[in-house]
Image: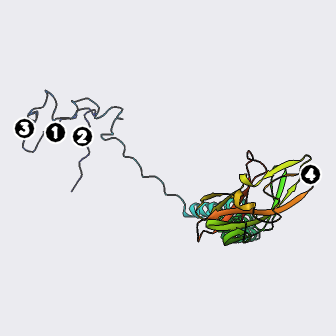
Amino acid sequence: MTQQPPFDPNQPGAQVPPPYPGAAPGQPYPGAAPGQPYPGQPYPGQPPYPGAVAGQPYPPQPQPPAKKSKKKLIIGGIAGVVLLACLGTAITGGGDDSAAPEKTTAAADAGKGDAPAADEVKAEETKAEETEKAEEPAKDETPGLKDAARDGKFEFKVAGVKCGVKQIGSDFLNQKAQGQYCLINVSVKNIGKEAQDFADSVQKAFDADEVEYAVDSGAAIYLEDNKVLFTKINPGNTVKGTLVFDVPKGTKLTSVELHDSMFSGGVTVNLK
C-alpha cells in the first residue's frame, strides 16, 4: 500500500481533500467556515501552525534527553562518599583517642552525681544533732542545795531542809505549829562594799503546786543561836541561821526564794 504524502496547501495546484469520506469535492464539513474544510483546520493557503516551514505540515516533535553516562555517575558517587568521610573526620577530631577521655569523664561525673556532696552530708549531720538537742529536755540551771545563789549584795547557800517538826523551843518556852514546821538552813554572805540588813520576813517558800508560804518569824525566835531573823551584815561577813515556815501537814517544799531586801527580784533555789 502506497502512503500518501501529507496535504500541503502551499503547493501549486493543491486541491483540498474532501472533509470526510463520501463528501463531494468542495463540500465543507458541517459547521465549517467558508473555505475551511475541517473545523480547526487552516484555510487554503494558510500555514498549518505559526512559524511552519513550507513542506512541514506538523510541528517538530521534542527529542528525549540524552542518557547520562553510567561511568560519570559512579565517579560522582565515589567522590561524594570521600567528601562526607573527610567532613566527619574533621568534626570529630580525627580519632578514637579523644572519645575515650570523654567517656571516662562522663562515667566519673555520673559517679559523683550518685554520691551525696560532702557539704550536704555535713549539713544533714548538723541538722540531726540540732534535732537531738531540741528533743532533749532543757537543763535546769536553777541553783540547788549547797550551790551559791546571788541576789543584790548577798550570796546565799542552802545547806538543807527539814519538814514535819511539830514544835520549836524548849519544854518551857516553845511554839507549836498550826500544821508542821519546815526548817531551811541557810548562810548569807555580804558580797557588797557596804553593810546590808538581812530580814527573814521577806523570804518565801513554794511547794510543787507553786503555792507561796511566808516565814514564821514568831516561831523562829525560839530557835537558839538563830542569826538570820533581822541582822546587819558587814561586807565580807557571813551569818548562818534557819528560816522557819509553818505549812500544812504533808506539804513538801520544793523551792525557796531569797531576797537581799523587800524590793529585790530575788533568786530561786531548788530544795529537791
Q: Which residue is mark 4?
A: 235
Crowding near the residue tagged with mark 1, few <14, some 14–19, many ≥20 C-alpha atoms within 10 Å: some
CB-based contact (under 8 Å), mark 2 and mark 1 = yes
**Of 184 and 155, which appears nearest the observer?**
184
**Is 5 drawn above or below residue 67 in the view shown?**
above
> Can residue 145 be seen in the rendering of this structure?
yes
| Residue denoted by label 1 | 17
Cα distance between the residues tagged 2 and 4: 157 Å
Mark nearest the camera among 2 and 4 is: 4
120 with respect to 42 (left or right): right
Q: CA distance from mark 4 to mark 1?
A: 161 Å
The front one of 129 and 224 is: 224
Q: Nearer the viewer, mark 3 or mark 4?
A: 4
Residue 169 place in picture, x, y as percent: 73, 68
Label 4 Cα crowd, 10 Å radius (few <14 / some 14-19 / many 20+): some
Q: Quadrant of the C terminus?
A: bottom right
Inspect the image, locate mark 2, and give the three-letter code of the amino acid beneath it.
Answer: Phe
How far apart are the alpha carbons under marks 2 and 1? 8 Å
- Sequence-wise, the earlier of marks 2 and 3 is 2
Name the residue located 72 percent from the left edge and 67 percent from the top edge. Answer: 183
Please name the colour scheme applied to the rendered image: rainbow
In space, the residues marked 3 and 4 are separated at their CA atoms by 166 Å
Determine whether the residue tagged by mark 1 lies in a helix, strand or loop.
loop
What residue is disc 2 on? 7
Q: Amino acid at mark 3?
A: Ala
Q: What crowding class fits label 2: few (fewer than 14 Cα within 10 Å), some (14-19), or many (20 or more)?
A: some
Left or right: residue 228 compared with residue 22: right
Question: In the image, what residue type sits under mark 1?
Answer: Pro
Frontmost of labels 4 and 1 is: 4
